[in-house]
Structures are given as C-alpha cells and as structure tokens.
Amino acid sequence: MKKFLIAVSALTMLGGVAMSSAQASPSEDLKQFRAYFFKKFPGVKLQDYANGIYALDATRRFEWEAMEEFPPYEDGIEVGKKLFEKYDLGSCFKNGGIGIKHHYPYWDKKTQKVRTLEQDIMACLKKKGVDTKAAKIGWKKGKLAAISAYMAYTSRGKPTSVVIDSSDASMAAYTRGKTHFYAKRGQLNMACADCHMYNAGMMIRGNLLSPALGHTTHFPVWRRKWAKKTAAKKGKSGPLDGFGTMHRRYGGCNKQVRAKPFKAQSEEYRDLEYFHTYMSNGIKLNGPAVRQ
C-alpha cells in the first residue's frame, strides 16, 4: 500500500495539474480526458471503455463474458420493471421513461440544481403518494436501484448525451464536480483521479483499478462484493442483492480513502456525477453491468 501511495503522488505531480485546469471549457476537458486514456491505453477503443476493467484485461474479460451469458442482475431488472409498472412511473417521464437514461444527469433550470435519474424516480414515487420509507425505498440500493437498473437497461446502446448548460450556475456546478474529482481527501490523501486516471490499470489489494472514462455507462451496477456482503448479513440471497447506484459507489470510494462520505444525492455527489458522466459523453450505455 505504501508503494502504491508513493506512485500515486508521483504520477499526480506529473500529470494531474494539467488535467485539473479550472480554465478549460467542458468540451476542452472532454477532449483532454479522452486523449489521456487513449495515450495510456492505445489499444482500447472509445466504446470499449463502457466495459471498465474488462476492456483492459483479457482474462477478466473472458470471466465477465461468461457471467453475462446468465447475468446475476437479470432477476433484479425484472423486479425493477414490476415496480416501475406498479407505480406507473412512466407517466412522470418523457417517452414513458423508456430509453432516456443517457440524458441523465441534467441541469434543472427551475431548481437551478443538477438532477439525477434517482431523484426523478423518487420525486415521481412521492407524487404518486408512495410512502417511500414504509415501502423501504432508499437512495443507494434495493428497490430504487432496481427501478433505475431497469430504466438503464431500456437505454442500452444509446450514447451518453449529457448537456452542460451554459448558464453561470450550471457551469459552477460542473466546476464543483470537476474539482471534487481531482481533489485530495481522506487520511490517505487521495482523489478520484489518483485511482481511476493516473493508476488505472494497476493492481491494488488484488483488484484492477478501472479507468474513469466510461465509468458511468454501466450504472447501476451489480457487484459481487455487495451481493456477498448482503447475503452474509441476511443469511440468504435475493434478486436485489448486489445492486447499487452511482452514489453508493461514490460513498464506498470515500470510505476506502478514509474520508467521510457525503449523503447519497447530496449536491456534492450530484455535481460530481454531472462532471463524471459528461466525461463519458459519446460512449454507449450498457447498464446494469456486473463488476468485481
């Protein structure tokens, strides 16, 4: 771990300053972001980044493709679909909520805030009179993640198309998200970029670090780690075990660098998702997906 942190610090000093320039426009950021990864992994095509670590490691890709033949998230998607239909959520969204996830998150001119898909799902549930607390619908996993996963599934193959509004407030949110991505935090003094840019493709604790490019295309995800943890806690496994939203993962990353996580759907994480997702613009969605 000590060697890993030394490597992180060195690489950050060499490459991080240019990438975190606050003066660049979103389109310039996107161009630089892609160029960084194209140089780092010259054999990986843009669309392959939707596959995360499986675009980098042939052995892991083989195992992942085998799992995708009988995907462990399949039953969870069916649960999400039933909940979507039960609560008539399609009436709250454009196109009946089908094939729209690639436009999320977006800048809401009315509230002057970044809006995520999970926020809009929860708002629709409350509009329908659903007592989300009684129904045990939380922000990070379970039923909400399943509904989001179903909606993501209907958007497979559509390229990420997040629009950064040109207003001052929207640009401020984008810049906050960008700053969060590159900022050091926690007792380990690490940033999102340390693991998922400068050290992408390296090993840590037996895990391969995934590239940030394409990260958001496969969320919500089904993680083996989450499934095992939930099953062990309950003493049995269920169709929603293993599902998690993007903000669940953000919180987990913060904990891993020994930083206090923000609440799911906090402004900090929504702004981060705004920047983070824009960096994957043009890459087709393939969520939900299996991850380690």
Image (cartoon, grey):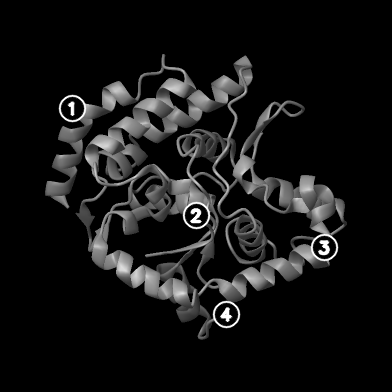
Q: CA distance from mark 3 to mark 2?
A: 25 Å
Q: CA distance from mark 2 to mark 4?
A: 21 Å
Q: Amino acid at mark 4?
A: Gly
Image position of 111 (left or right of 23): right
- Asked which secondary structure carries label 4, the reply is loop
Q: In front of the other: label 2 or label 4?
A: 2
Task: Identify the residue at horizontal 82%, vertical 49% (top origin).
Answer: 92
Q: Amino acid at mark 3?
A: Tyr
Check disc 2 and report the residue beneath it.
218
Q: Residue 97 or 229: which is nearer the viewer?
A: 97
> Is residue 112 among what the camera can see?
yes
Q: Earlier in the sequence, mark 3 or mark 4?
A: 3
Q: Earlier in the sequence, mark 3 or mark 2?
A: 3
Q: Earlier in the sequence, mark 2 or mark 1?
A: 1
- Asked which secondary structure carries label 2, the reply is helix
Residue 234, image x, y percentages: 53, 81
Check disc 1 and report the residue beneath it.
14
Q: CA distance from mark 3 to mark 4?
A: 21 Å
- Asked which secondary structure carries label 1, the reply is helix
Residue neighbourhood size for the residue with mark 2, other residues' Cα within 10 Å, grouped as few (<14), some (14–19), many (≥20): many
> Is disc 3 in contact with disc 4, using a CB cutoff of under 8 Å?
no
Q: Tell me the quadrant of the picture where the C terminus can be found.
A: bottom left
Image position of 86 (left or right of 13): right
Task: Identify the residue at horizontal 50%, vertical 85% (top origin).
Answer: 235
- Asked which secondary structure carries label 3, the reply is loop
> Is disc 3 in contact with disc 1, using a CB cutoff of under 8 Å?
no
